[in-house]
Image (cartoon, rainbow, N blue to C red):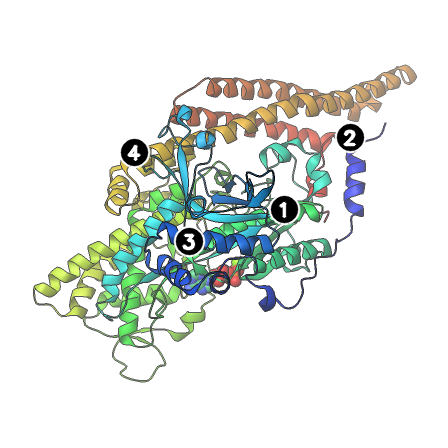
């Protein structure tokens, strides 16, 4: 009897690298060639239209309809020249990933022929049939009316044969149904709060930008092996499978050479990324087998987030060309690292000052210290909400796992900065803050110079200071970065506003700027050192207890974490910063619970089906063979068979115990699934779905053990050692 698994493994193993496309010239020759950026705008628009469009982009001036028509015409000409035939508003709904609905440029000309058309109205606004996008009851399903509107601050680009127009997605009553709308509001809130603080030092500051540099982790799995795993196909992760004898113990993958099939894939992704204007910089193996990472140079946060979504789409497409499927799931395989998306985040002014990097002089450092401490205070105050922002059905397997940030948000500053903060608490408020080793007065608190390139890292910390930025490490690999950035930005904006008001009041009361600032920072410093900052092992049980004592949020249930969004402090935060109304927060929570339930219930259903359709038949067949063997023993050695067949008998006992466990545990999963499926209310349903997920986790333990004892020939599913080591 042939074993399908062996055939699939053989096929996968035989695959050779497909040569990457060779682009003409160096990256600088084709960088941004598929983006309607400034140089293309200049080329395809008249100078008046160009001027109006750039003012719209830079300063938010609305476009009049005549100009919009001209912009659309220029875009159309450019797009047709680059082989585009269709156009779409490209947006980021609350499901994962992006959404698009393609319309052809082609229109009947009324004389029996067709012409290519695209006007300003279709550029600026579209009405997708939006009824099936999640909206948490804001818009009744029958009402199918939401609209997408162009976000001119993100450049239009071409993907395959389609002109993509980055857009926001909102309901007719004005509620955001996507990630981009609140992200833009949150970034504006940070700008509005940070500019007045910067002006304490430099009145010429006009804008404060948020920067994001993401690091995208992912797995590559051969597509034939993928196709032979129904759980991977339907849920993006393996719901069963005992860990491979060799996995990441040797750490050889992290330092190893990138396999040639994978390199070819990466090169094609880089070429595609460069054409889309994405400045991809880094590629490397990650810790787990067949796990990799890609990271660009950081950019303005809204653009960087679009670029992340665009690149994820490109990766999915390009992987297939190389016979791979890319997995963005946070935990595709048990027993080895999952995938995250580190969000490196910082703030900077239009005058070129990086606000989270030590300054050039005492005054610059003083400003740095203000932003540094206020960010920490903001994260401390909203630590539970920040955790809720990265929580998802997929990420739940990563949080609390040993390779990933724990389910408690703390901050890691490193020795150098912790020392600076402690010192600041002990000196008079007008003491200058200096970089050690620099010339000048040596009276102040010193920031050690080496700290700027500090490699002092703590991989267990979810929020780490890394010299000129904070690194939010807890974000899931499949997530939209906006989820976390919205919360972080809102919290920082709120904090900076409060800080500025306190300082203004103290100055009005006669204090100097330095004293007013330091007097207000000191209690914040004392508080974050006591509560938020933690340099130890974030995975330890002691830390869980310690964190609870400190008052940090230690909730570990994902559906419960989402309740943070509608807690009074969060509602106040989001409504005062003009980011979400209470109604939006409630609706979005419904969506989160709903998405969580759906994912967990699909997994529960898939897991129980596989137990019945794949696992039990294989286990029973093995048991039958053992029994046959035992019968033959008895026929041939009637007197001694009990002794001689002791190993078979032991195996039969173990198999039959496992088979019976699998059957009863499957019934429990199915019962939990049914109970959850029957529920209507989103929160209750999510809690019930969480129970089904727990039941599935118990079921898999018996399955994974059965896999270990069953004849390799009979096992119907590709094993981890095959999926993870063939590339
Ligand atoms: P590591 O793995 O050491 O964290 P990587 O090179 O993989 O470093 O990724 C670092 C990321 O941080 C890159 O995307 C980089 O552009 C980004 N980054 C560097 N400086 C800043 C900054 N000031 N603000 C935001 N992101 C930054
Ligand atoms: Mg990295």
- Disc 1/disc 2 C-alpha distance (Å): 37 Å
What is the number of the mark on residue 583? 4
- Considering only order in the chain, which callout, 4 or 1, is on the residue closer to the N terminus? 1
Residue 196: x and y in percent read 23, 62
Q: Are marks 3 and 1 in contact (CB under 8 Å)?
A: no
Q: Is residue 447 left or right of residue 520?
A: right
Which is more N-terminal, label 1 or label 3?
3
Instruction: Name the residue carrying label 2.
Output: 711
Q: Earlier in the sequence, mark 2 or mark 4?
A: 4
- Using the image, determine if residue 111 lies above or below residue 529: above
The mark closer to the camera, 2 or 4, is 4
User: Left or right of 67: which side holds 204?
Assistant: left
Instruction: Measure how far apart labels 2 and 4 are at the Cα level.
Output: 56 Å
**Contact between labelled residues 3 and 2, with CB atoms less than 8 Å apart:** no
Whether residue 404 can be seen here: no
Q: Give SS at disc 4.
A: helix
Q: Which is nearer the N-term, disc 4 or disc 3?
A: 3
Where is 199 relative to 689, above or below? below
Q: Crowding at label 1, few (<14), some or many (≥20) Cα neighbours within 10 Å?
A: some
Q: Which mark is residue 693?
A: none
Distance between the alpha carbons at the discs numbered 4 and 3:
24 Å
How packed mark 4 is, by other alpha carbons closer than 10 Å (few <14, some 14-19, many 20 or more), is some
Of badges 1 and 2, the one in the foreground is 1
- Disc number for residue 302: 3
Q: CA distance from mark 3 to mark 1?
A: 23 Å
Helix, strand or loop status at disc 2: loop
| Residue topped by disc 1 | 317
Q: Is residue 178 above or below residue 423?
A: above
Residue at the (67%, 59%) spot, across then down: 256
């Amino acid at each position: 009897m042939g074993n399908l698994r062996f055939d699939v493994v053989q096929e996968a193993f035989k695959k050779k690298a497909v040569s990457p496309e060779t682009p003409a010239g160096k990256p600088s020759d084709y960088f941004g060639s598929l983006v309607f950026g400034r140089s293309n705008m200049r080329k395809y628009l008249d100078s008046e239209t160009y001027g109006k469009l750039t003012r719209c982009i830079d300063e938010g001036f609305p476009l009049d309809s005549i100009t919009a028509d001209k912009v659309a015409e220029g875009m159309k000409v450019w797009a047709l020249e680059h082989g585009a035939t269709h156009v779409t508003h490209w947006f980021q709904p609350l499901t994962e990933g992006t959404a698009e609905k393609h319309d052809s440029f082609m229109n009947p000309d009324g004389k029996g022929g067709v012409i290519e058309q695209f006007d300003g109205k279709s550029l600026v606004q579209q009405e997708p049939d939006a009824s099936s996008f999640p909206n948490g009851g804001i818009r009744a399903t029958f009402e199918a009316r939401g609209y997408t509107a162009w976000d001119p601050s993100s450049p239009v680009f071409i993907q395959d044969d389609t002109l993509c127009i980055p857009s926001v997605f909102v309901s007719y009553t004005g509620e955001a149904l996507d990630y981009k709308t609140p992200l833009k509001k949150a970034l504006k809130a940070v700008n509005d709060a940070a500019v007045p603080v910067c002006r304490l030092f430099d009145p010429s500051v006009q804008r404060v930008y948020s920067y994001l540099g993401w690091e995208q982790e992912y797995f590559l799995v051969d597509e034939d092996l993928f196709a032979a795993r129904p759980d991977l196909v339907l849920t993006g992760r393996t719901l069963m499978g005992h860990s491979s004898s060799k996995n990441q113990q040797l750490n050889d993958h992290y330092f190893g050479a990138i396999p040639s099939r994978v390199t070819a894939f990466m090169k094609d992704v880089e070429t595609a990324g460069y054409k889309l204007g994405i400045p991809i910089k880094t590629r490397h193996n990650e810790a787990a087998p067949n796990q990799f990472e890609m990271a660009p140079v950081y950019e303005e946060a809204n653009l960087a987030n679009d670029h992340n979504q665009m690149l994820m789409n490109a990766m999915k497409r390009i992987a297939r060309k190389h016979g791979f499927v890319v997995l963005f799931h946070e935990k595709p395989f048990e027993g080895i690292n999952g995938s995250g998306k580190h969000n490196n985040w910082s703030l900077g002014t239009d005058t070129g000052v990086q606000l989270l990097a030590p300054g050039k002089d005492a005054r610059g450092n003083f400003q740095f210290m203000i932003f540094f401490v206020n960010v920490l205070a903001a994260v401390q105050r909203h630590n539970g909400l920040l955790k809720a922002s990265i929580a998802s059905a997929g990420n739940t397997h990563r949080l609390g796992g040993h390779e990933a940030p724990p389910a408690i948000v703390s901050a890691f500053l490193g020795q150098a900065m912790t020392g600076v903060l402690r010192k600041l608490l002990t000196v008079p408020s007008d003491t200058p803050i200096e970089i050690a080793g620099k010339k000048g007065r040596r009276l102040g608190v010193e920031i050690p110079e080496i700290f700027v390139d500090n490699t002092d890292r703590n991989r267990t910390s979810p929020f780490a200071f890394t010299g000129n930025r904070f690194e939010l490490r807890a974000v899931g690999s499949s997530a939209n970065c906006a989820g976390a950035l919205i919360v972080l930005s809102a919290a920082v904006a709120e904090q900076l506003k409060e800080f500025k008001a306190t300082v203004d009041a103290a100055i009005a009361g006669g204090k100097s700027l330095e004293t007013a600032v330091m007097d207000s920072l000191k209690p914040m410093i004392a508080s974050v050192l006591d509560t938020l900052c933690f340099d130890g092992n974030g995975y330890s049980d002691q830390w869980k207890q310690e964190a609870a004592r400190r008052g940090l949020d230690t909730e570990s249930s994902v559906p419960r974490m989402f309740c943070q969004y509608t807690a009074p402090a969060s509602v106040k935060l989001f409504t005062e910063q003009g980011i979400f109304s209470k109604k939006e927060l409630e609706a979005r929570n419904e969506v989160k619970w709903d998405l969580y339930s759906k994912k967990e219930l699909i997994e529960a259903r898939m897991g129980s089906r596989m137990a019945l359709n794949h696992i039990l038949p294989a286990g029973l067949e093995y048991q039958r063979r053992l029994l046959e063997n035992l019968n033959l023993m008895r026929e041939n050695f009637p007197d001694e068979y009990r002794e001689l067949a002791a190993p078979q008998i032991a195996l039969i006992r173990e198999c039959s115990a496992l088979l019976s466990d699998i059957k009863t545990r499957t019934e429990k999963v199915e019962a939990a699934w049914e109970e959850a499926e029957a529920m209507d209310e989103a929160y209750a349903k999510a809690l019930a779905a969480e129970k089904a997920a727990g039941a599935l986790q118990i079921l898999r333990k018996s399955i994974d053990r059965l896999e270990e004892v069953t004849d390799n020939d009979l096992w119907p599913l590709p094993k981890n050692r095959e999926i993870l080591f063939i590339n």
